[in-house]
């Protein structure tokens, strides 16, 4: 299948809208039949459950408790194989602008996964959606991928979560805008990537079909949010637009945590005795390529896998240095080109 993926351009949303996703629009050089939406089941949305949502449904290998509250954020909990407990807490996502919660077996491993969308008050080139995808691995335990991008939520699924090759497994089309090396905010590129999921893990692809990724599409004043088709093109000489990498399948670093401190910008930094030798330190910028000033912290012990989304520069961050110091960890993803800048920190015993 010949596939070229262009950019998604969203309309500005109104804060008063309870369902901002219905106003979303994007353009692809593919017909709807070439990019079929992966079928998902809509569990809850903000229009029907304005004050929140509490339920118990079949997710992963068994029943899971779901709780969405305007005051407390979202939490999901259950048990995996052999009864190991798991819990996910997402407190920093605004719910007052609406939300959508879906279920579906994204990687065709027989386990139902979750897709949670919340909305921001962003406009212009900033993403107005926060996409949290919870997949389950072979142990029946969750893995969280979290990204800020514009998506179109529909009754039957999400336009950016597709099944391009018809194999029953989902692909994620992730598009981000970068104008860091442009002369102004309009002098930038939309960057489209494709991720595929396997046993709960996401891999960013360099090729799909007959085309290489990522795909770059320059901003044009002709973009009005309609379903336009414009030919992607290579960045101009000297330009190096880049997008975040949210891959969860291969770590960018691993080793023993020697210390946890704060950078000058206030963001949490991990000092690591690397498995391959030497000492490395993680680095994040405020408003870097990952847009969201947070990271996913997974603490995976024999008794429980606990996943939290933590604001990287929050003064009251709930991260006990003594708890994680000298523990093994793996780091995934990239938010700052050329630096060790993960968006997922996975701590084990």
Image (spheres, rainbow, N blue to C red):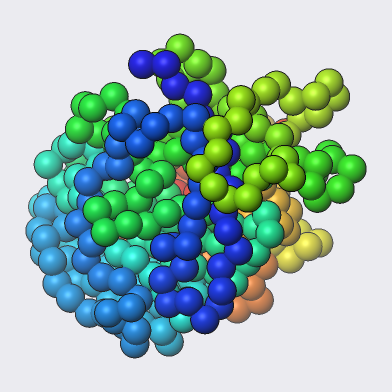
Answer with the quarter of the image where residue 165 lies.
top left
Residue 231 percent across, percent down from the top left: 61, 25
Task: State the count of labels.
Answer: 0
Please state if 239 lies on the left or on the right of 202 as rendered.
right
Question: Which residue appears farthest toward the right when viewing the image?
Answer: 183
Give the left or right position of residue 26, taking residue 264 as reference.
Answer: left
Q: Is residue 101 placed above or below 111 in the rendered structure?
A: below
Q: Can the viewer see residue 183 in this picture?
A: yes
Query: In this rendering, would 9 be left or right of 221?
Result: left
Observer-nearest of 307 and 64? 64
- Residue at image position (16%, 37%) is 109
Coordinates of residue 182 in the picture (x, y in percent): 84, 40
Up-down: is 331 above or below 235? below
Looking at the picture, how far across and down is residue 137, in whole percent? 24, 43
Q: Is residue 299 visible?
A: no
Q: Where does residue 275 sit, x and y in percent of width and height? A: 53, 32
Quadrant containing the N terminus is top left
At 73% from the left and 59% from the top, the residue drawn is 286
Q: Given the current orientation, which residue lies at the most extreme top position?
A: 210
Query: Quadrant location of residue 278?
Result: top right
Residue at (61, 36) in percent of width and height: 191
Say which residue appears at 44% left-offset and 21% top-offset.
3
Q: Is residue 47 above or below residue 291?
A: below
Please state which of residues 53 and 246 is positioned toward the viewer in this rendering. 53
């Amino acid at each position: 299948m010949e596939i070229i993926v262009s950019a998604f351009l969203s309309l500005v949303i109104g804060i008063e809208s309870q369902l901002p996703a219905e106003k979303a629009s994007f353009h692809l050089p593919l017909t709807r039949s070439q990019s079929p939406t992966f079928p998902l089941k809509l569990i809850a949305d903000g229009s029907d459950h304005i004050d929140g949502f509490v339920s118990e449904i079949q997710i992963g290998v068994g029943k899971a408790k779901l709780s969405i509250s305007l005051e407390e954020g979202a939490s999901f909990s259950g048990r995996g194989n052999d009864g190991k407990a798991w819990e996910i807490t997402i407190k920093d996502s605004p719910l007052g602008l609406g939300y959508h919660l879906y279920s579906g077996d994204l990687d065709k491993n027989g386990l139902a996964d979750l897709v949670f969308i919340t909305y921001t008050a962003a406009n212009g080139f900033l993403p107005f959606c926060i996409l949290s995808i919870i997949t389950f691995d072979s142990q029946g335990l969750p893995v969280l991928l979290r990204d800020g991008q514009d998506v179109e939520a529909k009754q039957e699924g999400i336009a950016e979560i597709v099944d391009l090759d018809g194999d029953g497994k989902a692909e994620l089309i992730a598009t981000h805008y970068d104008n860091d090396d442009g002369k102004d905010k309009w002098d930038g590129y939309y960057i489209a990537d494709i991720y595929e999921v396997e046993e709960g893990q996401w891999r960013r692809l360099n090729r799909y079909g007959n085309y290489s990724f990522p795909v770059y599409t320059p901003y044009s004043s002709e973009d009005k949010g309609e379903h336009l088709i414009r030919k992607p093109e290579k960045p101009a000489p000297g330009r190096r637009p880049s997008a975040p990498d949210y891959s969860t399948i291969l770590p960018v670093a691993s080793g023993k945590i020697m210390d946890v401190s704060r950078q000058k910008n206030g963001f949490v930094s991990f000092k690591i005795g690397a498995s391959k030798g030497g000492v490395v330190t993680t680095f994040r910028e405020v408003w870097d390529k990952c847009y969201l000033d947070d990271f996913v912290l997974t603490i995976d012990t024999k008794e429980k896998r606990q996943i939290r989304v933590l604001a990287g520069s929050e003064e009251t961050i709930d991260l006990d240095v003594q708890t994680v110091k000298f523990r093994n960890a793996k780091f995934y993803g990239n938010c700052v080109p050329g630096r060790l800048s993960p968006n997922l920190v996975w701590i084990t015993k």
